[in-house]
Amino acid sequence: MNNYIRQCNEKLQWVIHSIYKFLAFIKHLLQEQFNKNIYTRILFTNVTAFVAGLIAVTMFSTYVVKQVAYDQSQQDLLRKAKRVNYALLQQTGQSWVPAPDEQANNQGQGGQEFLKFLADTFDVKITIYNKEGNIIGTSEDQEVVPGSKVETKFIEILTKGETIITKAQDSETGQPTLIAFVPMGNNMSTIQNGILLETKPSNVELALNKMRLYLIIGGMIILVIFIFISVHLAMYISRPISRLSTTVSEISRGSDVLSVEDQPLDEINILAGQLNKLAVRLQKIQAESSRMEEERARLFGEISHELRTPLTSVQGFVEAIRDGIVQDEALMERYLDTIYIQTLHITRLVDDLLALSRLESGNITVEKLPVNLIALAQGVVMSMEDAAKSRSTSILFEKKTENAVVIGDVDRMEQIIRNLLKNAIRATENGTVRVGVETRQSEIVLSIEDDGIGIASEDLPHIWDRFYRVKNQRENPMQENGSGLGLVIVKKLVQLQGGSIDVASQLGKGTTFSISFPSFDQK
């Protein structure tokens, strides 16, 4: 016996474990399909929601219809019970008081037939009992044995004289039944017996089954239509998202930036618009990155070239001196002067590179204060007179206004004037350099004009480029020339202080630089 119980437990555990594994597999399969993509999510969600809704509607409809049907059946049974009571009260000459057996067989025959007639008419089972609970009449006599009694609760109900309807269950078939009780009589004083009417609302269950069948068939038809609609809807939503995903993947792989076409849904169309903006921005970033990379490579090449020339000269002269090739003191002095000049050139180049780097990165401070441009320019002219005399050149200062106050950094302003004046002196020999300050409308204009060698028309557009030298400088690399960054630095300093710079030049006639700053109103 114990072995049998143990085997049953083992089989039961195996069945439970198998069911659990099967349910876990179904759950994993559904989750995998649900999380596969948005298409399956939309389709699965819609179908699941519809099926759940159909089940809920079926259950709710069944409950409502069942309640309504039972309420109607109860009301109908109650009306039948009252009619049976009335009919029995109108039956004269019939006594429902228990009598001896020989009298019951004679007297109750007519009442039995009348009860059967009423039962057939109203399609119910009729039972009559007295206050003691003894059954004294029934429409189905063969089902009642002599001495049968009704349930105690019906005796209590008869004593109270109430009319009720209750639900019960058939002990043989298990089907639900309705039982109506009415006291037999018109008032409490005349009530001696009770009447029970019993019916089986089989029509209710039949109607419910038909309704469920119709709902299931209709639901399956609607489900098929709903699946087709859901498939179309899922494709309508998922296709634009898939196209957006493909576009983003192409961009992430470094492909050319693509433009996303307009999408049918507003939300996805907004996302596509934002993606287009992002794509344009990425395109600009890529272009800027490529330009900066090219600029960096060009800058390194230019720096290498600018440093290689003086360093090669210095290396050659140093090797000649070290190897004892140069014995003449005058030649030795000349070599040392050349080395010194080239080291100065390298120093200026490094200083200008650092200055330009700070300007382009924004790591430079400018303290803007009112500056008298006339006084500043005169001071710079006086400090540069000796350099001009070494080139047999004179500097003339022309003041065409009495009020030339601008907003700027005095040190940066001086750097601008000194750099331009130095270039003018370098380009002029046995000539004149004119520095002028004048007012033009709401601006103060500083001009530096020379009658030197001038700049060729083909060189003029490039003088603001880094490391660019005009033709005469390129032909004389050994003399003390600029770094090729001076004008670039000047232009950025002028722009940094809210000004502008222009140049006009003719080859062999000279060059004029004009710098304009907004005038400062001292009122």
Image (tube, rainbow, N blue to C red):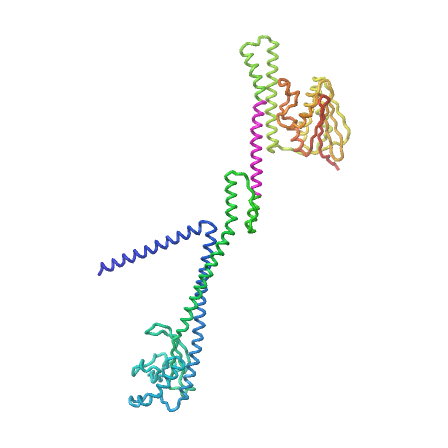
Q: Is residue 419 above or below residue 75?
A: above
Residue nearer the viewer, 422 or 64: 64
Residue at image coords 46%, 55%: 45
Residue 334: in sight, yes or no? yes
Across and down, in percent, residue 217 comes to: 43, 64
Residue at image coords 59%, 30%: 357
Could you tell whether 173 is left or right of 328 in the image? left
Residue nearer the viewer, 202 or 154: 202
Residue at image coords 59%, 27%: 354
- Most extreme residue toward the bottom is 93
Could you tell whether 299 is left or right of 162 in the image? right
The number of numbered badges drawn on the structure is 0
Q: In which quarter of the image is residue 481?
A: top right
Across and down, in percent, residue 335 comes to: 60, 13
Residue nearer the viewer, 264 or 403: 264
Which residues fall within the magenta stretch?
Answer: 277-306
Q: Quadrant of the C terminus?
A: top right
Residue 158: in sight, yes or no? no
Q: Does the magenta stretch include residue 142?
A: no
Overall secondary structure of the magenta stretch? helix
Q: Is residue 281 magenta?
A: yes
Q: Quadrant of residue 258?
A: top right
Across and down, in percent, residue 108 comes to: 33, 88
Could you tell whether 283 is left or right of 110 in the image? right
Q: Quadrant of the N terminus?
A: bottom left
Could you tell whether 283 is left or right of 124 in the image? right
Q: Quadrant of residue 156?
A: bottom left
Q: Is residue 515 above or below residue 62?
A: above
Across and down, in percent, residue 363 comes to: 60, 33
